[in-house]
Amino acid sequence: MAGAVLWRVAVTVPEAMADSFAEAIGDGAAAVSTFELEEGGDWLVETTWAAEPDGARLSARVAVLAGANGLAEPVLEISALPPLDWVSRSYEGFPPLRAGRYFVYGSHFEGTLPAGAVTLKIDAATAFGTGEHGSTRGCLLAMDALAKRWRGRGRRQLGLVLDVGCGSGILALAAAKTWRVPALAVDLDHESVRVATVNARLNGLAPLVRTGHADGYRVGAARTHKPCRLIFANILARPLARLAPGLRRHLAPGGVAVLAGLLARQERLVLAAHRAQGLVLKSRITLGEWRTLVIGRR
């Protein structure tokens, strides 16, 4: 990939039209992404092309779509990206990470693993979660604090650990390796489930970590066990709030849930939903604008 020239095509539009414009300018693109620029505001629709796109055709599509929906025609940005060795650059973006006792590294790491650390080889690839993000790192730090409090606990005391919105599977793998307990990693995205399964094998944890597809806490494999004493949910603020009743049903008395994927301004929303279910805040971790909440049953 060294020296390959890629092209970027982007447009900023209202949230309600993001998907329509993504389809309009993404036909033939190598990748399509949409990003919320500010909560409740405009979205950036961005596409990447392996060859120079037909600017006239894309401009015409944007103009027609805007006119049909009564919008002022948005500015269409088309630019060539500088040639880069994208593989090397992606590795540079994921250096080894230390979060408490956890040392997370990729397959490209050639250094020495630190003695005494819980090491995790994680290649996120097409799934979220390599530890560098504030929400994932916050969960690892929360797990480190729990490991100090729960020193000596194991399978009998903890039972099954549930990781909802598992992404790369990093939290389920860390829990399984910390306490040698079974863990269930589930995600709404089938590709994340595949990556988590690969990472479980990569870390020699396939006998302990199972993966599956599920939307929220209501997963068949979890229903065959007693309510969980430890649950991780690293998703987004609104889904966390919506799923609060499910967390209450699946969290054992005295159990703990680690919630992440929310910003500081969204903490009140998430806490209110869980307090309405009789759950209480035990601690929080702040990393920049990201919040990780540790909650439990009374």
Image: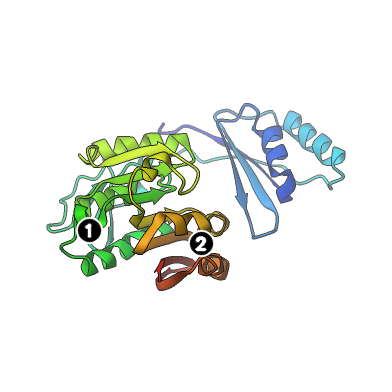
* Residue type pointed to by label 1: Gln
Label 2 packing within 10 angstroms: few (<14), some (14-19), many (20+): many
Q: How many marks?
A: 2
The residue shown at (18%, 65%) is: 151
Q: Quadrant of the C terminus?
A: bottom left
Q: Which residue is mark 2?
A: 262
206 lies left or right of 194: left
Q: Is residue 124 visible?
A: yes
The image shows residue 142, relative to residue 34, as above or below, that is below
- Using the rendered view, name the quadrant where residue 117 is placed: bottom left
Q: CA distance from mark 2 to mark 1?
A: 29 Å
The image shows residue 68, relative to residue 113, as above or below, that is above
Residue reaching furthest to the left: 115
Of helix, strand and loop, which one carries label 2?
strand
Q: Earlier in the sequence, mark 2 or mark 1?
A: 1
Q: Which residue is mark 1?
A: 157
